[in-house]
Image (cartoon, rainbow, N blue to C red):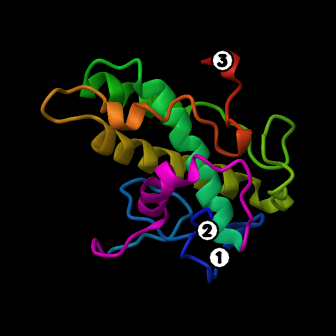
Amino acid sequence: MAYHSSFANSKFRVGNMALLPIRTRYSGPAPTETSTETEDIIDEAIKFFRANIFFRNYDIKHDGDRTLIYLTLYITECLRRLQKCQSRTQAQKELSSLAISTFPIPGEPDFPLNGMFTQPASGETDKMKQYLEQLRKECSDRMVDRVIDPETDKPSKWWLCFVRRRFMDKSLLNIGTL
């Protein structure tokens, strides 16, 4: 059974995706989590990634799960980029460019999960784009910290072994664009 998000009671939404508080230094629409002791959605996505990546089906129980699904797919893209990196500096550059690159949002034709996500309301499109970009930037920073081994300055093989796996048989990017 797949792991689900513990953030079931979110007060804020954009589209049908939970707008959850995160610990971040990047500005955006997400509320800022100030406590360093509590886990945010990005920590949860990284923690559950290695277990959830094996599932082809994922039963969505609440809006927090949609945020978890998006982050899991984004982590997969991060790992694809990190496998080519030879140093921490190169990894930071690679993932920061991935985070700010143009990406589709729910409702656009290129978005791979349109069946699970609803298009944001006309006034929420920019908010959705900013929220996803904020998640991507913070997740990229944390993935560099988690995956790059400080002793060897190279990506950990224990993370890179998941590069070929596809969560729910989906990918955020077209494989040919990598």
Magenta residues, start to end? 35-61
Query: Of the residues shown, which amino acid type is indicated by label 3?
Result: Thr
Question: What residue did someone put label 2 on?
Answer: 19
Badge 2: few (under 14), some or many (20 or more) residues near its Cα, within 10 Å?
many
Check the image and report above or below for 54 versus 144.
below
Position of residue 16 measured from the top left corner of the image (x, y, whole percent): 77, 66
Between the C-alphas of marks 2 and 1, the distance is 5 Å
Q: Quick check: marks 2 and 1 in contact, CB under 8 Å?
A: yes
79 drawn magenta: no
Position of residue 54 measured from the top left corner of the image (x, y, whole percent): 60, 47
Query: In the rendered view, does 46 fall on the left or right side of 130?
Result: left
Check the image and report above or below for 105 versus 171.
below
User: Which numbered marker is on residue 43?
Assistant: none
Q: Point out the frontmost of discs 2 and 3.
A: 3
Position of residue 2 measured from the top left corner of the image (x, y, whole percent): 61, 62
Query: Of the residues shown, which amino acid type is indicated by label 2?
Result: Leu
Residue at left 16%, top 36%? 150
Between the C-alphas of marks 2 and 3, the distance is 29 Å
Give the number of marks.
3
User: Which numbered marker is on residue 177?
Assistant: 3
Position of residue 83 measured from the top left corner of the image (x, y, whole percent): 41, 23
